[in-house]
């Protein structure tokens, strides 16, 4: 059955989600819109949607091959990806290998300080509250996920790190940190959302040049060039 786009289900800051004619399947449409600081800062990164769509697909395929269940099913066009429809768990799971961003602010440690054992952090996915940090007890109190689900999410987030870190290292990229979202379909959990320079900190392994959305957040310039460079290193030319 060919996939047809139906009603818009949800429009976020960087993506639109559409219902399809196939039950349990949605389409993610990737926009060029970029926001930062809970949408206080708004802009456009030309071509970002195409890059994030393709790069997420490539990395979801790498993860599936390594046994991580993801919502990714098929690439439909430059900006559209067919996915399983998930009931998204309102937790942002962050994994960190190197001190950067809010961890540098919270600890006073210098950006770039290596972290021996990767750190997992949880944030409440809530725009009105500005995504505050949570611990396991808060997750239990708010019933955002069951203890079994949370334990699976943390284990899977570390597994994603174990798979992606060497994959990126081989392509000259240091995986500093990244954000994941998970969701349920029936009784099963899947990795959802996207994996892109919007949701990861990616530094050139040698020069430590920022090749991610921090260039936009921090007005560093060369934003489109950085996204294009990551794309060049990660996405095989034939796909
Ligand atoms: P942070 O250092 O600002 O907490 O960000 C950690 C990682 O999470 C970084 O790779 C960027 C990503 N991230 C998102 O994907 N969405 C967000 O809203 C924020 C604040 C960070």
Image (tube, rainbow, N blue to C red):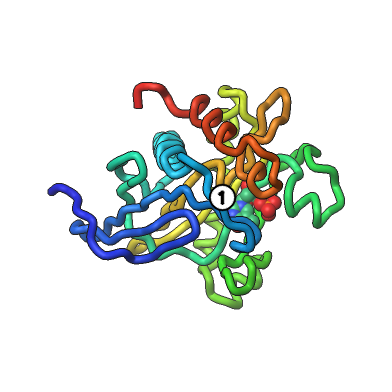
Q: For the view shown, which residue lies furthest in the bottom direction?
A: 141
Local crowd size for mark 1, using a 10 Å CA cut-off: few (<14), some (14–19), many (≥20): few
* In the foreground, 94 or 224: 224
65, 89: nearer the viewer: 89
In percent of the image, x 33 and y 46: which residue is there? 80
Instruction: Judge left or right: residue 76 versus residue 134.
Output: left
Q: Quadrant of residue 129?
A: bottom right
Along the line of sight, the residue nearer the viewer: 3 or 62: 3
Q: Furthest residue to the left?
A: 1
At which x and y percent is residue 27?
A: 31, 53
Please tell me whether residue 200 is drawn above or below residue 235 in the rendered image. below
Kindly identify the residue that appears in the image at 35 percent across and 22 percent down. 238
Instruction: List the single residue furthest toward the right.
Output: 108
Residue 110 left/right relative to 196: right
- Asked whether residue 229 appears in the rendered view, the answer is yes
x and y percent of residue 186 in the render? 33, 63
Query: Percent x, y for residue 231?
Result: 49, 31
- Helix, strand or loop at mark 1: helix
Number of numbered callouts drawn: 1
Q: Please give the name of the residue rendered at 44% of the width and 41% of the height, measured from the top-left corner.
A: 56
Residue pictured at 50% horizontal, 62% vertical: 149
* Disc 1 Cβ-to-ligand 1 distance below 8 Å: no
Q: Mark 1 points at which residue?
A: 155
Position of 210 relative to 103 (above/below):
above
On the picture, is 110 further left or further right than 54?
right
Q: Where is residue 145 in the image (x, y as percent from the top left)?
A: 51, 68
Whether residue 154 is visible here, answered yes or no, is: no
152 relative to 7 in the view: left or right:
right
Report the quarter where the C terminus lies.
top left
């Amino acid at each position: 059955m060919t996939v047809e786009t139906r009603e818009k289900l949800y429009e976020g800051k960087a993506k639109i989600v559409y219902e399809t004619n196939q039950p349990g399947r949605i389409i993610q449409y990737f926009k060029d819109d970029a926001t930062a600081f809970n949408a206080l800062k708004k802009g456009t990164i030309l071509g970002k949607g195409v890059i994030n769509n393709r790069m997420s697909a490539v990395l979801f395929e790498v993860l599936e091959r390594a046994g991580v269940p993801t919502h990714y099913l098929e690439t439909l066009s430059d900006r559209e990806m067919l996915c399983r429809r998930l009931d998204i768990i309102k937790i942002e799971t962050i994994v960190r290998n190197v001190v950067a961003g809010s961890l540098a602010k919270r600890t006073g440690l210098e950006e770039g300080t290596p972290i021996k054992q990767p750190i997992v952090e949880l944030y409440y996915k809530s725009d009105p509250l500005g995504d505050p940090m949570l611990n396991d007890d808060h997750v239990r109190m708010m019933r955002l996920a069951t203890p079994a689900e949370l334990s699976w999410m943390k284990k899977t987030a570390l597994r994603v790190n174990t798979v992606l870190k060497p994959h990126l290292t081989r392509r000259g990229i240091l995986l500093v940190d990244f954000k994941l979202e998970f969701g349920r379909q029936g009784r099963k959990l899947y990795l959802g959302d996207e994996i892109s320079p919007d949701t990861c900190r990616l530094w050139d392994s040698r020069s430590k040049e920022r090749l991610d959305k921090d260039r936009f957040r921090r007005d560093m310039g060369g934003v489109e060039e950085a996204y294009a460079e990551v794309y060049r290193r990660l996405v095989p030319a034939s796909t």
